[in-house]
Amino acid sequence: MIHNISIKIVNLLSKYGSIQKSREVYIYGTECFINEMIGNLLLFCIALPLHQEWQIFIWLFSFLSIRIHLGGYHAPYHWLCLTISTFVGISSIFLNWIWIFIRNYSILVLFICDIYILFTKAVVHKNHPMTQKKLHRERFLLLINTFLINIIVIVFLLSHNNWYAPILSGIFCSVVMSIVAKFPKQTGQ
């Protein structure tokens, strides 16, 4: 369904001359955009009755600022991507409560995530091949984002402000998605 909607959107844009070439790339990008919008809308709809809409927004910002450079698991189907993304987002709400409960150990969780980020290679998806130059740039951006996010988390932790929790959840979820992607895929025989 998402694929068909994407084709219709790309056809409409092609009709007006907005798309010159690489039609498949535009279709794939439109599919990704629609999938992200559905996932984020679903996530906000779940967060709203839990009074966690700002926490989800902060988590999403933190999660994406690390994950886009670190990489991670990519589901083979849109429905699976939507399911996993929503599950990860919802789990972040519960992680926020855990980080607040174990406030004194949150810095340890942050440190472990930082060590992983510092010493691991980014997960490169087959649909997004990268040159060495692009890999170095992504690594540089990852380290800058991680440094800035760490400063924010530490400032919030030291000022006893609970806004550190969704940021820490974003880092943690990004690291978990990266770790999951490093496991070999099982093939049916």
Image (tube, rainbow, N blue to C red):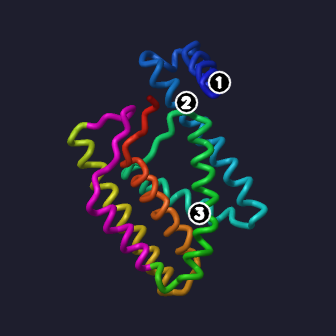
Q: Residues within 10 Å of mark 2 (few under 14, many from 20)?
A: some
- Locate residue 35, reporting x and y percent: 60, 37
The answer to whether the residues at label 3 and label 2 have Cβ atoms under 8 Å apart is: no
Q: Which mark is residue 30?
A: 2
Please indicate whether residue 53 sits to the left or right of residue 89 in the image. Answer: right
Residue toward you, 13 or 153 = 153
* Residue range (magenta): 107-130
Q: Which mark is residue 92?
A: 3
Q: Residues within 10 Å of mark 1 (few under 14, many from 20)?
A: some
Please name the amino acid that badge 1 sits on. Ile
Q: Earlier in the sequence, mark 3 or mark 2?
A: 2
The answer to whether the residues at label 3 and label 1 have Cβ atoms under 8 Å apart is: no
Q: Secondary structure at mark 1?
A: helix
Please name the amino acid that badge 3 sits on. Ser
Q: How many marks overall?
A: 3
- Above or below 67: residue 35: above
Query: Label 2, label 1: how many angstroms apart (C-alpha)?
Result: 9 Å
At horizontal 54% and vertical 15% (from top left) the residue drawn is: 14
At horizontal 65% and vertical 65% (from top left) the residue drawn is: 54
- Locate residue 176, reporting x and y percent: 45, 58
Q: Which mark is residue 74?
A: none
- Locate residue 104, reporting x and y percent: 48, 86
Pair 3/2: label in front: 3
Q: In the rendered structure, does residue 123 fall within the stretch colored magenta?
A: yes
